[in-house]
Amino acid sequence: MLRRMRTHRRGWTPPIPLTLVTALAVVSPLGLSGCQKVKELTGQTDESSDEDETEDKTSEDPAADAPDQAAVELETAKEAGLAEAALAPPPVAGPMTGLDDLLALVPKQDGDIKGVVVVRDASVFLDYIDEGSNFVAGPLTRLGAAAKGNPALSELASAGMVYPMIKGQYEAAKITLAASGIHLDKGIVVADDAQGNGVIIYAGDKPDALPSLIKAIDDSGPEMSCKNIDGHAGYVVCTEEKADLEAYAPAGPEGAAAIRARLATNLPGVDFEASNIIMDIAEEDLHLTIETPPGLMVMSLAPPQNEPEMQEMAQTFTPSAGKLLRGVQPGAGFIWGNVSPQLVADEMVADIANDPGAPQSVKDLAGQLTGEFLLAGHYQPAAVALQVGLKDDGSWPAVAGELEAVMPGVKEGMSQELDIPGATWDVGIIDIPVGAETVKALHAGLSGVPEADVLAQMTGLTIDGWVFAASDALHIALGASPEAIGQLPAAPGEEGPSDGLRAYLPGSLMSALDANQVSMVAHMPLDALHSPQTRELIKTALKNVEDVDADLVLAMFDLASPLSNGTMWLTHSGGKTQIHMALQAFGHRADDEGKAALAAAAAVASGADPTASYSPLVAQYPNSARLAAYRARAGQTQAALVASGVGALVAAGALAYPVLEGARNEEISEELDIEEDAAEKAKEESKQDPTPTPTPTPADDTKDETDNTEPEPTPDPTPIIPVPSGDEGDEGDDGAPTPPPIIPKKIPRKRN
């Protein structure tokens, strides 16, 4: 038996990318690649009595209303300079035109309509374009300059020249629109009736407002016939065929209720009252809602379920309770998913089981794979880790034994294949402390290169990769020391998201997770990408790289600078696979703070200094729910880069690429003012006991005052009494409770 095992060891060398270098390639700068809903928040804050408002009021400080443990976790995130909620409560917006009022304008008919798109307030999209244009001009000009001479980037090179012409055409069209008599804020309805005949319904001062606008912008536009809608003052219906116009009659409350019911079936759990855009294309089996409160965009999409891509997605990802989410710290970026156990068994496990060269212990460990995985950034301690779920980790010691026997050959191979001037590889099996026990881990560390000191000082990470199994998970991580890495596995009995993570993420996501409907979640904080440190790192690291212009990279980042973070998740309910996405902007146009944030970001995108542009936001709005974003962009939060996960990978890629291309900046440490032996100091600091549990800060009632004056109500169509459609009941929700809103609610303050 022992001889057979020894012979087996000599015949089996673990494929480097499958073990240690998997960690280095994913999370290391110098591995193989390194480079890669308000329940009607907008309202409808009901005009109820002061007593009712007091009873319903919740604090804008997530830690103030959260359970004790959640408050502690959120305070920890706050002390690290990170956000306490994935979505900051937006300012209260004015009411939109009633959804049922607009649905009642859909053509009345005997059969079902083929499709309907409702936009309750289209004016917000002009705001998006207007604000977006403030961010585009500078980066496009720089992109064009950086792309000159590179045939592969020829389209980018011409973008800077074409943009001014497009901007001029848009400004002219906007002036024409403003004089047209069309009221975008009162809603638009586009529908195809049962025969496929299309109608457009809008609010206008005169029937020919839309056709005249179209002709003014494009003389070759389609001919349209229009008329006022009887009983719905101010609304106009247009068709291409006069016969269709003469036959038109609004569907009324019954028609609205029928469409509502269909929406509830195709998008179970979605809050339609909070949505601005509602799309239901039955012919294509495409269903969509988008919410657009100030500074946020929240989308729920049910794509055509019979499309091959959707079928493959539904077969690949299956709902799970999210056991590994226990490893996510509030404020950190992560990607979690649950791959179908059957797919894992058929594809991965079967391949390993049929590999005659794989040791039995490796086959045994592969047989324990659950399909669950988590890739996350960590700030206490600093780490980036991939965790793969196991039914049981009992096979790991035998695997570690197999690995230990082949370490000399692995070390020799890495030294030859990853030969970096001045670098020393340290490869072996060592013990790491996990709770009260020790676990053997495969370790590979790289030292002797200035890039290691740069990474350490900027992120707290060192170029040390670890592979081990504990707490029913296989861990592939990048972190500074055994003591730091040993804190990654969950304590016995810990499963699923912590109280703090529950308070941090959108409530509807947590509700769906509790109902076992979620199969994938990704949360990406992006503000650290726009810090002065990140920008200087990219410019300095890529200084000598000829085929990658640093300004081109930064210009690409600047184009995305209006976005602060994004959260995406997949749900499976009522036989539908849905994609949900919440995108938070760095600012908005609803109050002075939001405008100041947008102005700062636009200035940086046009070349202004990040520290000088973002630091005033930190000083002027110290109690803002968006403070963490301001601090990250001002360069005041070291943890933000590694915690985001994305930031750590960007830093890693920027440092790795020049090394792999033979274009290192030998003066990088001096130019970035990196402390000598920063990597070794980071290792020593990572061995210290975790930061003591903080005491949650009492809720601060002296928040920044914001003008929440109620805007003038938007005129609605002639009111109708909506017929209950069942979209708030349990139908089609797989027994799940009515989900809470995605967007956190901000209560208007009382004025003295």
Image (cartoon, rainbow, N blue to C red):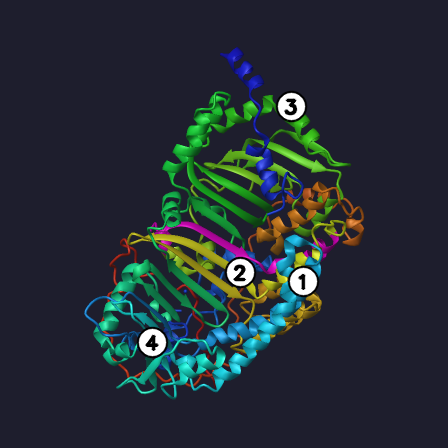
Q: Earlier in the sequence, mark 1 or mark 3?
A: 1
Calculate the distance from the C-alpha at mark 3 to the C-alpha at mark 4: 75 Å
Instruction: In the rendered structure, find residue 533 and report the number of the disc placed on it.
Output: none
Q: Is residue 63 visible?
A: no
Residue 364 in the image: x percent, y percent?
Answer: 44, 26
Q: Is residue 150 visible?
A: yes
**235 or 73: which is nearer to us?**
235
Amino acid on which disc 4 is placed: Glu
Q: Earlier in the sequence, mark 4 or mark 1?
A: 1
Q: Are marks 1 and 3 in contact (CB under 8 Å)?
A: no
Q: Which residue is mark 2?
A: 565
Instruction: In the rendered structure, find residue 240 and report the number of the disc placed on it.
Output: 4
Amino acid on which disc 3 is placed: Gly
Q: Secondary structure at mark 4?
A: loop
Residue farthest left in this picture: 110
Residue 176 in the image: x percent, y percent?
Answer: 50, 83
Identify whether 125 is placed above or below 742.
Answer: below
Q: Earlier in the sequence, mark 3 or mark 4?
A: 4
Q: Earlier in the sequence, mark 4 or mark 2?
A: 4
Q: Secondary structure at mark 2?
A: strand
Calculate the distance from the C-alpha at mark 4 to the C-alpha at mark 1: 42 Å
Instruction: In the rendered structure, find residue 409 and report the number of the disc placed on it.
Output: 3
Neighbour tally class for label 4: few under 14, some 14-19, many 20 plus, Cα within 10 Å: some
Span of residues in magenta? 512-540
Residue 662 in the image: x percent, y percent?
Answer: 74, 42
